[in-house]
Amino acid sequence: MTKVKTVTASMLIIGDEILSGRTKDANLTHLSLWLNRMGVQLKEVRVIPDVGQVIQDAVNELRRQYDYVFTTGGIGPTHDDITAENIAKAFDVPFVQSEKSLALLQQHFGSENISDARLRMTMIPEGATLIKNPVSTAPGFQMENVFVMAGIPVVMHSMLLDLEKRIFGGDEMLCKTIHVFEGESFFAEMLEEIEQDFPHVSLGSYPFFRNKRYGASFVLRSQVEEELEAALDMLKLKIGAMGKEYFDGEAKL
Amino acid sequence: MTKVKTVTASMLIIGDEILSGRTKDANLTHLSLWLNRMGVQLKEVRVIPDVGQVIQDAVNELRRQYDYVFTTGGIGPTHDDITAENIAKAFDVPFVQSEKSLALLQQHFGSENISDARLRMTMIPEGATLIKNPVSTAPGFQMENVFVMAGIPVVMHSMLLDLEKRIFGGDEMLCKTIHVFEGESFFAEMLEEIEQDFPHVSLGSYPFFRNKRYGASFVLRSQVEEELEAALDMLKLKIGAMGKEYFDGEAKL
């Protein structure tokens, strides 16, 4: 039997501004694609408000359920940035000043410009390690399997650079896509057969309307390359046998 | 004491394609803004995979915790569309064919074109009522406080039209925004004071970088209009007293 190693992650998007519709999240897709390159599968995302107990409960639930948890948002200098202190509470450890973080901010802003607000950004749960912020200095941090990052996309994306050596992935999820210009229901039975025939392949069907034509993208995903290729060949064969054409898609996820 | 009526909702985005990064969600912001107009506050969003037990558990958790639950995705004609059957399981009711839905599809596609795949879209939990789909006919459904909708944005958005009379909101969350061109940490202490002085107002601070300048948007939200206006006046006053300028923002959420 084929053995695959699967490593999982969840993402916690913390912020009233996403829930209220004011700001569109721009980190989910980026994190998902990055994780996939690391051999990690994003299995759940939650968007929650800036409420301490809600943050604590969600972090504790997710860090036990998944190999890694990535949070975004709520680590700035103002009163509504409450993520860090609630991570400390979730882990039941003291909330302490990081000397290293303080030194970084002093160097960046000048010692004379370290206000109470900026000091707030130097506080981390005891035992946490910093995550470098090449864009705007104030670091994120890692506490066990939880990675706490900024919400601003350019900052969050830059923080991932520092995590490449801290994440240990499994077998990468590989992906193949083909498109047809015909309603997906026409192929429904055939698609189900293929998924049943290839136990390590998941097959998604996504309808679209493009250039005034209905169509569907069939997305095959697997951690077992040979099986993925065999399923793709079978899918193409069956579409051809049904008298239909297919078009190769980009190898998107 | 000021009394406010708060009605809450959560959203469940069902689909491997969102988690894998293949597709960007385009429904969260739309639903959030629509709900706000209905006097309902979106309090939590979860993105979960097409896995039956995960769907059931999430629906059961969220429908007990919030006044309304809105799901998107997984109600099409193919094998990977498993939302409807798992909503039935979550409610522990039979999964039955809707005569009304069947009639709609027969009318739309012609009786001779109702394949097994299309029949799949006529199945709903016993006791559910249909949600009209003006775009592509195949309906969504409401089961108690859970609204099950399509994932394709244009379809999902059109389904909301049929829900306007089924949602009973509370006091609308009102919102005012002003911007400053100065780092948010400069104002941190003052912002905290304002939030403490106005118990029915939440005040968010969102940094930005625009036209080569750093700045921050201060977003005041409240269900009590007089308090919102008073907090806004106080905020403007204090920014002025600090020798800084502010700029009125659009009344975005």
Image (spheres, coloured by chain):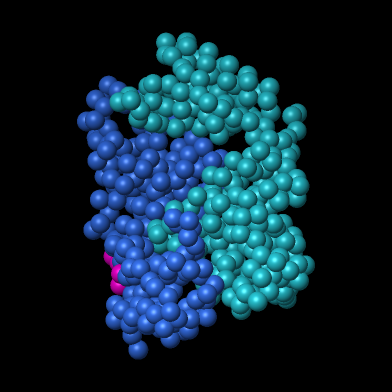
Chain colours: A blue, B cyan
Q: Residue at x 48, y 84 (%)?
A: A193
In the picture, the quarter occupied by the N terminus of chain A is bottom left
Q: Residue at x 50, y 24 (%)?
A: B249
Relative horizontal placement of residue A128, taking residue B112 as reference (left or right): left
Relative horizontal placement of residue A194, taking residue A155 as reference (left or right): right
Front residue of A239 and B194: A239
Based on the displayed image, in which of its 4 quarters is residue A233 positioned? Answer: bottom left
Give the magenta-colored segment's residue range. A168-173
Q: Residue at x 66, y 50 (%)?
A: B160
Q: Is residue A82 visible?
A: no
> Where does residue A173 sit, x and y in percent of width and height?
34, 69
Q: Is residue A185 above or below residue B9?
A: below
Relative horizontal placement of residue B14, taking residue B149 as reference (left or right): left
Front residue of A113 and A47: A47
> Where does residue A245 sit, x and y in percent of width and height?
39, 73
Task: Reply yes or no: does residue B185 show up in magenta.
Answer: no
Q: Is residue B129 visible?
A: yes
Relative horizontal placement of residue A200, taking residue B78 as reference (left or right): left
Q: Residue at x 59, y 47 (%)?
A: B31
Q: Residue furthest bottom?
A: A1
